[in-house]
Image (cartoon, rainbow, N blue to C red):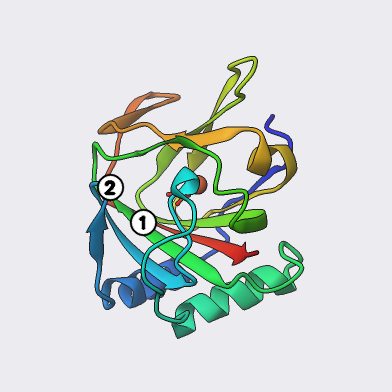
Amino acid sequence: MVPGLVCVGRWLDEDGRRRLTADIDAAPWSSQLRRRVQHYGHRYDYGSRGVGGTPAPPLPGWAVTLARRLHEDGHFDRPPDQVIVNEYLPGQGISAHVDHVGSFGPVVASVSLLSACVMEFTHPEDRTRVPVVLEPGSLCVMTGPARFTWRHSIPARKSDPGPNGRVPRGRRVSVTLRTVL
Ligand SMILES: O=C(O)CCC(=O)C(=O)O
Ligand SMILES: [Fe+2]
């Protein structure tokens, strides 16, 4: 429904999810934009804010493993070298944006952990809105129009609409991998 968007459910199995979450939680978090974040690789972040800030630490082992697998699976033509980890507590979200076009390459990949949530893709001209459920362990890859034209956001709310009523959110952690231009 969103051209250029590919989502793979259960990209990480339960053990993989548990180990990745433990590795991430063993690292220090910093607080920005009301969410907690970790940056690795070049510190080019926050969409329209563009390039900035102090250099980030190199990719830790778990991020190198994810980056290699995404490259080997054919999602990237070189292993992604920039990683942002976002934590969302129920009620937190991210406003509609396109990941900074001048800073990042043509592929943006996100792995979801812990709680499911709904990401909304919005077309800037006709305002078409497509909700996409991000399940724990899933991989979402944005290329082409999904990457460059459509905006993505996570509504700041405590539950999401589901087929059988509202689905409460829990703590969610996402890992987004990109290449720096
Ligand atoms: O949490 C997510 O899945 C998306 C994060 C995101 O869009 C970003 O950091 O640019
Ligand atoms: Fe984004």
Toward the viewer: 28 or 74? Answer: 28
> Residue 53: x percent and y percent?
37, 64
Label 2: which secondary element? loop
Q: Is residue 132 above or below residue 140?
A: above
**Residue at (48, 47) in percent of width and height:** 47
Of circles 2 and 1, the one toward us is 2
**Residue at (43, 62) in percent of width and height:** 84
> Residue 162: x percent and y percent?
42, 27
N-terminal-most mark, 2 or 1? 2
> Residue 76: x percent and y percent?
72, 65
How many neighbours does mark 2 have within 10 angstroms: few (below 14), some (14-19), or many (20 or more)?
few
Instruction: Please name the amino acid that badge 1 sits on.
Output: Asn
Residue at image mark 2:
33
Label 1: which secondary element? strand
**Residue at (43, 67) in percent of width and height:** 17
Q: Is residue 120 left or right of residue 86?
A: right
> Residue 51: x percent and y percent?
48, 58
For ligand 1, tell me if the residue under mark 1 lies within 8 Å. yes
Q: Is residue 113 above or below residue 91?
A: below
| Image quadrant occupied by the C terminus | bottom right
Residue at image mark 1:
86
Asked whether the residues under the numbered discs 2 and 1 touch, taking CB atoms below 8 Å apart as contact, a structural biologist would say: no
Q: Is residue 18 left or right of residue 100?
A: left
